[in-house]
Image (cartoon, coloured by chain):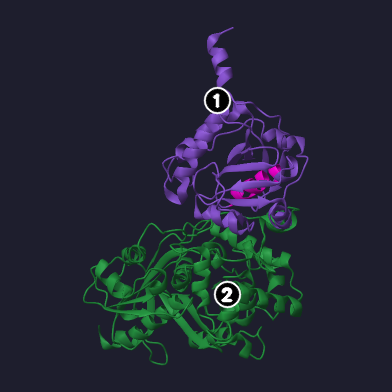
Chain colours: A green, B purple
């Protein structure tokens, strides 16, 4: 690479530009018949095929939250490299709860920016359906504080329910309005071949009919069954490279424009205002600053709606809407695929599914797919330029924001 | 008198007059209306066709449930089980789910099986609820014996209804631990788990008149009738 050309592929502050040139994804759902590493290998091979390569990976980074607990398997990064026959590529595991995928992506970006490597395969996966539903819920709850939260039965659905109640009290949101988000997400997921729940639901079915209180029963009041993500297995993968070497890949790169991440107190009760998702705001601000844009420039977003309330709150924290106003935009159809600012065109965690460690890369996968205009008919965002993903670790205590841009 | 007929009559168990299950409908999450009604004996051969493809599906224990369900319905059809009934759930006439059971005596019901063909809408949960409603509210029984043959069943019945474990009693399906739904447990769970509207509007009920075989089974990818 000539020096002059290399400089051209750097941002104005001299940082090496990085892009995504390959994406892969398994279907999300019940994949308990397969081994976790095989699931991740499948997504990885898809990403490599998409990039038009069968090797040449300098580093493999795996995002995963709990294979040691759920699958009684550790060292999955080494196992994946071997399964893919990618030795002697460097291999690391990144674990950051449900934000493991995005954190792995961030590490891949940093590795390339540093100049240490040129091509990184980031694969994130989780297999949660080999254990019972309550064991999976308990597993996720282990990210809460072991002394002042977990022993009191605080699971993530319980956290989300308390959060929703506080939000309802402050902004007057209703249960029915929460169902609107679910209906939109299910509609998008129906058209997404990777989605766990490809089943459209209606307001009549989950909110308005006299049977809805049973069909859509409470799980953790005021949150009902269709206000929550399913427990899923799955994996997603991306091939990242330095833009100065992107020409050798099959597909045009999608540029990583901004990445930010931030943390907040481990214990939710230590926050001054439990409705203030500070880490989300800070991570998004950092990503906007790096990209040199603001929320008004974002064409669409993938937001971590493990519970539908989070789609609203995250949309407000990243600056799309004023606090308490996101639901008005949703009611006007602004966040639908055909709306002014589509949110979760993939179906979101709500309906696409949430294999916790895989979610971050799955979101990136969706950003790339949309920015390449490769999304399925009926869920392709019109002329997208920038896509934002928010991957929410813990109950907002470790958040990663990613902005990708169409080159 | 025809000897074969006479012999057949000797083999058949005595049948008790059972109050019929009054049809109802439920609006599912998809907005589709599922009609739940009692299956007629002459409809059993079609329901056997519904079940048959699932007999070799190991996943989620469909094989054991389907095989036993098939035998129970065949027993019902050929008059070899006493006081058995079958309920069927349909959406636009297509069979989505079925359940069955029988009366041991006036006070005790025996829940047999519940099977969902169309998955993702919790049709099975509604069918089980309808079955319990039949035993407790329509037939006015005191208790229903229940077992689970799959983790899904265990979660849906034993946990959601908080059934009473009564392992020292024998369920007709074998040695699987027996749980019991009492009237108190049923009414405690009713608001949360049992729903439906009666009467079913004539037009809607008519869609269920002729049962339609499912064309595809999510349990058997790629399978078409």
Instruction: Locate residue B13 relative to residue A405 in the image: left or right.
Output: right
Q: Position of residue B124 (x, y in %)?
A: 59, 48
Q: CA distance from mark 2 to mark 1?
A: 51 Å
The residue under label 2 is A155
Question: What residue span does the magenta drawing correspond to?
Answer: B121-135
Q: Could you tell me which chain the residue with mark 1 belongs to?
A: B
Query: Is residue A237 rendered magenta in the image?
Result: no
Q: Residue furthest top?
A: B1
Q: Could you tell me which chain the residue with mark 2 belongs to?
A: A
The residue under label 1 is B78
- In depth, the one of B73 and A279 nearer the eye is B73
Residue name at image x 36 percent, y 81 percent: A108
User: What is the tally of numbered marks visible in this picture?
Assistant: 2
Q: Residue A407's image quarter?
A: bottom left
Q: Which of the image's four quarters has the N terminus of chain B?
A: top right
- In depth, the one of A193 and A240 nearer the eye is A193
Residue name at image x 72 percent, y 71 percent: A328
């Amino acid at each position: 690479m000539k020096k002059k050309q290399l400089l051209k592929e750097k941002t104005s502050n001299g940082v090496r530009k990085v892009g995504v040139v390959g994406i892969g994804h398994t279907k999300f759902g019940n994949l308990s018949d397969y081994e976790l590493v095989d699931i991740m290998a499948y997504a990885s091979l898809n990403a490599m095929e998409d990039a038009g390569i069968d090797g040449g990976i300098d580093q493999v980074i795996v995002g995963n939250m709990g294979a040691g607990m759920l699958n009684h398997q550790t060292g999955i990064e080494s196992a994946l490299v071997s399964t893919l026959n990618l030795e002697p590529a460097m291999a690391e595991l990144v674990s950051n709860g449900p934000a493991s995928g995005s954190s792995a992506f961030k590490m891949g970006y940093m590795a390339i920016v540093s100049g240490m490597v040129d091509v990184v395969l980031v694969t994130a996966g989780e297999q949660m359906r080999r254990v019972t539903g309550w064991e999976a819920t308990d597993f996720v709850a282990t990210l809460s504080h072991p002394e002042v939260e977990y022993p009191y039965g605080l699971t993530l659905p319980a956290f989300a329910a308390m959060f929703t109640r506080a939000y309802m009290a402050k902004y007057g949101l209703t249960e029915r309005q929460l169902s609107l988000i679910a209906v939109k997400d299910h509609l998008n997921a129906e058209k997404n071949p990777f989605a766990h729940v490809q089943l459209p639901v209606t307001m009549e079915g989950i909110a308005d009919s006299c049977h809805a209180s049973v069909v859509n029963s409470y799980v953790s009041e005021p949150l009902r069954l269709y206000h929550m993500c399913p427990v899923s297995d799955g994996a997603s993968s991306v091939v990242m490279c330095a833009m100065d070497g992107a020409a050798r890949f099959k597909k045009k790169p999608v540029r990583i424009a901004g990445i930010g991440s931030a943390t907040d107190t481990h214990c939710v009760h230590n926050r001054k205002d439990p409705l203030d998702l500070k880490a989300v705001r800070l991570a998004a601000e950092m990503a906007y600053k790096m990209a040199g844009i603001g929320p008004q420039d974002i064409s669409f977003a993938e937001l971590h709606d493990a519970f539908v309330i989070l789609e609203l709150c995250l949309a407000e924290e990243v600056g799309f809407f004023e606090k308490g106003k996101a639901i008005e935009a949703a009611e006007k159809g602004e966040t639908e695929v055909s709306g002014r600012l589509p949110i979760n065109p993939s179906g979101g965690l709500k309906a696409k599914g949430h294999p916790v460690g895989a979610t971050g890369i799955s979101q990136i996968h969706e950003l790339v797919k949309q920015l390449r205009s490769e999304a399925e008919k009926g869920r392709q965002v019109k002329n997208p330029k920038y896509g934002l993903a928010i991957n929410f670790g813990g109950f907002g205590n470790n958040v990663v924001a990613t902005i990708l841009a169409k080159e | 008198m025809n000897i074969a007929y006479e012999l057949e009559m000797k083999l058949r168990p005595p049948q008790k007059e059972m109050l019929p299950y009054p049809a109802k409908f439920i609006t599912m999450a998809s907005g589709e209306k599922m009609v739940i009604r009692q299956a007629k004996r002459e409809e059993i051969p079609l329901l056997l066709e519904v079940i048959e493809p699932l007999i070799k599906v190991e996943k989620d224990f469909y094989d054991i449930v389907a095989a036993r369900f098939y035998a129970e319905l065949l027993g019902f059809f050929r008059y070899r089980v006493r006081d058995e009934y079958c309920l069927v759930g349909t959406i636009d006439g297509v069979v989505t789910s079925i359940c069955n059971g029988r009366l041991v005596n006036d006070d005790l019901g025996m829940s047999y099986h519940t099977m969902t063909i169309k998955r993702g809408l919790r049709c099975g949960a509604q069918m089980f609820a309808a079955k319990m409603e039949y035993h407790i509210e329509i037939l006015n029984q005191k208790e229903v014996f229940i077992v689970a043959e799959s983790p899904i069943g265990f979660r849906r019945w034993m946990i959601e209804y908080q059934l009473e474990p009564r392992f020292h009693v024998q369920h007709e399906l074998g040695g699987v631990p027996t749980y019991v739904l009492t009237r108190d447990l049923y009414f405690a769970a009713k608001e949360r788990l049992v729903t439906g509207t009666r009467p079913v509007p004539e037009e809607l009920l008519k869609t269920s008149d002729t049962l339609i075989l499912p064309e595809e089974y999510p349990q058997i990818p790629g399978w078409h009738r």
